[in-house]
Image: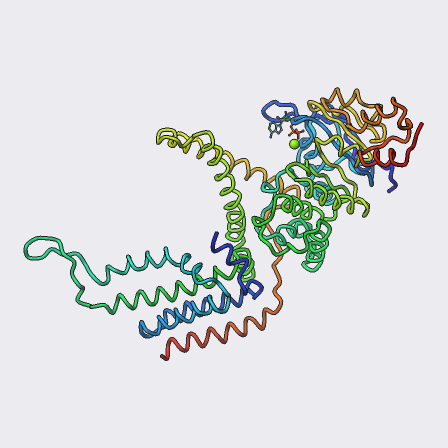
Amino acid sequence: MLIEQSAYTNRWRSISPAAKGLFALSGLIASFAAATPTTAAVVALALVATTLLGAGIGCARLARVAAPALGFLLIGSLSLLVSPALDASGSLTLQWLPEGSAPFFRLVARSGAALAALLFLVLTTPLIDLIALMRRLRFPDVLLELMVVCYRMLFVFSEALHDTLTAQAARLGYATPRLALRSLGQLTANLAIQVWSRAHDLHIAALARNNDGPLRFIEPTFADTRRDLAIAALAGSILILGATLL
Amino acid sequence: MSFNDVLLQFEQVAYRYPDGSIGLDGCSLGIRAGSRNALLGANGAGKTTLFQHANGLLQPQGGVVRYAGTPVDYSRAGLRRLRTDIGLVFQNPDRQLFSASVREDVSFGPLNLGLDTDTVRQRVDAALDAVGLAHAADKAVHNLSFGQKKRVCIAGVLAMEPKLLILDEPMAGLDNAMREELLSALNGLHAKGITLLLATHDIDFAYRWADDIHLMARGRCTASFASAAMPAREDDLKAAGLPSPQVIALHRALVARGLLAATPLPRSQRELVALLETGALS
Ligand SMILES: Nc1ncnc2c1ncn2[C@@H]1O[C@H](COP(=O)(O)OP(=O)(O)O)[C@@H](O)[C@H]1O
Ligand SMILES: [Mg+2]
């Protein structure tokens, strides 16, 4: 929900998603092209700065959104730094790997930069704009329809789930572990029926609006896509060039 | 088409659901072009079933549905024409909005009609404007209020420019302010010549707003009459399990005490108060 909120309220909401996508893509390429961990870290910083200063996303918000991924990244890459081993006396110890810390820093810096690029995109661009962009880029219709319906259903179901949970809790459905297990079972059954019935209703509603198969929607228009794209291309190239040459 | 032409006609329409429950039981009624219609009936009376027949989602097992004088053609092309002219707005917005984007969802119907992008854009803007949501075009559906979502649903059907707009319980779940907004949107559509048919439980609203009233009970269409004739049809209301509009009893009591003339008949509290203030004594 944090991501959703930023995507709709950030300063760059009205900038063409194609431009933001291009910039994020350049960021990704730059993070892989980066010659040294230091350059990758610089790329990451540049992307974070753009997100914070350009799009006006709050520092705390960015940190909160990035935290789970960063934590995962750090724990995962620790294995590049140390490894458990049995020493002579037969007890388990941690050993520094012979390669030293270089692979660790390289991985963390690169992944961090790539993460920053992706976060820039999702925090500034609502998913509906991204789907429209993918439609323009001629992604397969089936995939897009699935995304459209799933994305919409996500909210419908989180509401249904929340309502059912509240109703159960109000009648002490989760008072004891036994009751909780029972309530959870009922909740699952109830939601399964709702999925079915809602899918059916959506189908009927589509027919009522004269639908005969593919779901079609218009693309949103953005004020100055060409200018936005040009700026994004320029910024992206600087990022990539900088990363490879530095 | 003149005001008295019947746009949509049900003749002895019968429908039974696969599980055996009766949806419609020999239902007959007519909707005049350009009129405002209220369909009243208790829960389970068959209002939604009737609406699904009007738009060709369900096919009668007995009787006929006529649109503009001719029986509905249930071929692909026939249904396409019918659904272009008759728009149906369902009761629950979360069960009919497809896209999370307001503009995209409203574009869904007109794109299904095969219109070109420019026309679709114009229609989407016009439809959102007609329901007072022009400012919300680029919002996400899940960030709208319930009343706004309902109006997005209406815009989605309006953008198909139907001749007859059918709304299933449009006022349900709306607070007073939202009702007033919706009502003024509907009156705007009526002024543009769109025929309106809506299901409601609110007899006072129906009496005040509608030209024609249709009653349903247990799958039967028990009565159809001009709204102005309501005071004489209280037995029909009772038979359908509906109360009388409050203003009728109030007016009657005032007439009995000699405080008001027997005519004109006020159709809302506001009209009644106006009559009292102008002192239309017997
Ligand atoms: N999908 C369905 N399957 C079986 N029975 C249904 C279905 N939909 C409605 N019914 C039954 O048909 C009758 C009319 O329902 P409905 O048209 O939804 O009434 P209303 O809209 O006036 O509340 C009810 O008895 C209801 O139980
Ligand atoms: Mg109903």
Residue A244: give x, y in percent of width and height: 37, 77
Q: What scheme was used to colour the molecule?
A: rainbow
Q: Measured along the vertical axis of the image, is residue B136 above or below residue B154?
A: below
Q: Outermost residue toward the bottom?
A: A245
Q: Which residue occupies the foreground of this view, A186 or B231?
A: B231
Residue A98: give x, y in percent of width and height: 17, 67
Q: Outermost residue toward the right?
A: B282
Q: Outermost residue toward the left?
A: A89
Residue B279: give x, y in percent of width and height: 91, 33
Residue, x 62% and y 62% (percent of image)? A221
Q: Quadrant of the N terminus of chain B?
A: top right
Q: Which residue occupies the foreground of this view, A199 or B232?
A: B232
Q: Quadrant of the C terminus of chain B?
A: top right
Residue A166: give x, y in percent of width and height: 48, 36
Residue, x 73% and y 29% (percent of image)? B40
Q: Is residue B156 left or right of residue A36?
A: right
Ligand 2 in which quarter:
top right
Image-quadrant location for residue B66 = top right
Q: Measured along the vertical axis of the image, is residue B118 above or below residue B264?
A: below
Q: Measured along the vertical axis of the image, is residue B101 above or below residue A39?
A: above
Image-quadrant location for residue B88 = top right
Report how many numbered discs are placed on residues in the image.
0
Residue, x 69% and y 24% (percent of image)? B219
Q: Is residue A151 left or right of residue B156?
A: left
Residue, x 40% and y 77% (percent of image)? A242
